Amino acid sequence: MSSVLSERIEAIYRQVIARNPGEDEFHQAVKEVLESLGPVLVKYPEFSEQKIIERICEPERQIIFRVPWQDDHGEVHINRGFRVQFNSAIGPYKGGLRFHPSVYLGIIKFLGFEQLFKNALTGMPIGGGKGGSDFDPKGKTDGEVMRFCQSFMTELQRHLGEYVDVPAGDIGVGGREIGYLFGQYKRLTNRYESGVLTGKGIGWGGSLVRKEATGYGAVYFVREMLKARKNGLEGKTCVVSGAGNVAIYTMEKLQQLGAKVVACSDSQGIVIHERGIDLDLVKQLKEVERRRISDYAVRHKDARYIAGGNIWEIPCHVAMPSATQNELNGRDAKMLVRNGCIAVGEGANMPTTPEGVRVFLDANIAFGPGKAANAGGVATSALEMQQNASRDSWTFDYTEKKLDEIMTRIHADTHATAEEFGAPGNYVVGANIAGFIKVANAMVALGLI
Ligand code: NDP
Ligand code: 2IT
């Protein structure tokens, strides 16, 4: 990169920090993308003239609202709701809702920023957005979660629509929450507008494979990375962090493809089961009983539970961080490399710190960044929107085949883009550039809006 160019990109980054103080995760996500863009500006001078990077870093709209609700004892609680509508150049805003006590504007903005490039990579007509709340669903009754979701949607509904903004799930938002949110949207608008939310139940407008899609897709991406290196998943030992939606279906597909998953986790600790994780039990504990992963070791005496343990200390060939941002740091990455890890696929959004990413790239590990590797979830959301628009529902096999094709194509695109821009094998550069170019071209075509 010429020094003039790097100075220009540096200046843009400094401006992002100044305009968005205290939003560390957003700064981190922006920095990683900007670091990839030097060669793009050389090839496409119109992107500089039109100030595309500056515009892309500024969300189109940011909505923050009060969410009052009552618990089962009649006590009043007030949470904060967010929706950041980041970019609609290639389609309506699309992206999940996160309910977690750590949520603040910086988290939602980082997720929205990642989302707009990820969505472009899917090849589907969806823009980028993200939302959520600092509400903590843990320990709440179904009634409390329902009342919270109804209050949240009472405000959010005015900003949504199948051609406007289409939320889905993320941490703390699964099938139960999408049901309550959709019910309230339907009641307030008096419209059965199926395409306004994705991740719906199969009996009321949902798509088969959406529940499995993020995890399955991430494994397909790893399969493709290994294939490019003349290797495969059969017989590999894997470690998957988290025990939520993404982690569960990552483990399921790894097992289906002949790999052995020896550990998973939740925010309290890790469980190690050398003969292979019993996925039916994880599903029962997490999807049905909503319990802690520590209970796994209560029911399987030959499994080990370590409270507060570090899952990346467990030797494995393939690591799939599938819990949350910045859960795998430089030290963890070094340990994984030392222990023989050959591939990392990010099921979560930005789970690896910048230092960790550097370690993996320097060690020539096959590293699939979240933007590319976890795009299968939102891609299948777009397939759900297609089915809703045509009032159709596809079979599991047909939908899964489409997901596989999309992930295989995202791998090929990001691989080829990395090569074209002088960084062969670097999927971080490949994903950032391929996603950016699609959005930037649309923004140029649509004029200064
Ligand atoms: P879930 O709520 O289903 O599961 C989240 C899992 O991660 C739980 O095991 C949770 O443990 C753990 N976790 C959450 N926050 C933390 C934390 N701060 N520290 C440690 N562990 C934590 O969410 P999903 O599986 O849907 O999401 C997981 C990741 O995947 C997120 O980064 C999300 O953005 C990303 N993602 C999700 C997609 C989807 O379709 N759902 C699509 C693409 C990416 P505990 O229960 O103890 O809190
Ligand atoms: O991070 C993500 O891609 C998601 N949480 C899924 C978004 C979606 O709209 O399906």
Image (cartoon, grey):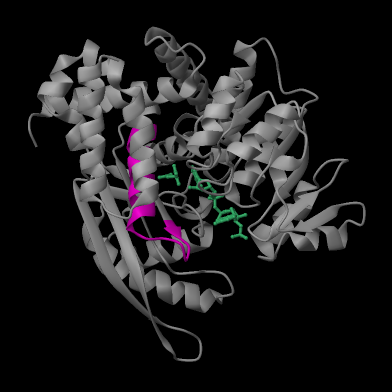
Front in this rendered view, residue 4 or 356: 4
Q: How many labels does the image show?
A: 0
Q: Is residue 61 above or below residue 426?
A: below
Q: Is residue 359 above or below residue 84?
A: above
Give the percent coordinates (x, y) of residue 246.
58, 45
Give the percent coordinates (x, y) of residue 289.
69, 66
Residues rendered magenta in the picture: 98-118
Identify which residue is drawn at 21% across, 33% down: 11
Residue 40 seen: yes
Front in this rendered view, residue 278 or 41: 41
Residue 208 located left or right of residue 439: right
Q: Is the magenta stretch mostly helix, strand or loop?
A: helix
Give the percent coordinates (x, y) of residue 8.
20, 26
Q: In this view, does 158 lie above or below 253?
A: below
Question: Residue furthest toward the left?
Answer: 448
Quadrant where the N terminus sits is: top left
Quadrant where the C terminus sits is: top left
Ligand 2 is found in which quarter of the picture?
A: top left
Residue 317 seen: no
Residue 69 located left or right of residue 243: left
Identify which residue is drawn at 76% across, 44% down: 263
The question of residue 280 being in magenta is answered with no
Residue 344 located left or right of residue 123: right
Question: Residue furthest toward the right?
Answer: 302
Q: Is residue 333 above or below residue 155?
A: above
The question of residue 107 being in magenta is answered with yes
Identify which residue is drawn at 72% across, 47% down: 264
Residue 417 located left or right of residue 43: right
Front in this rendered view, residue 385 or 136: 136
Give the percent coordinates (x, y) of residue 249.
64, 42
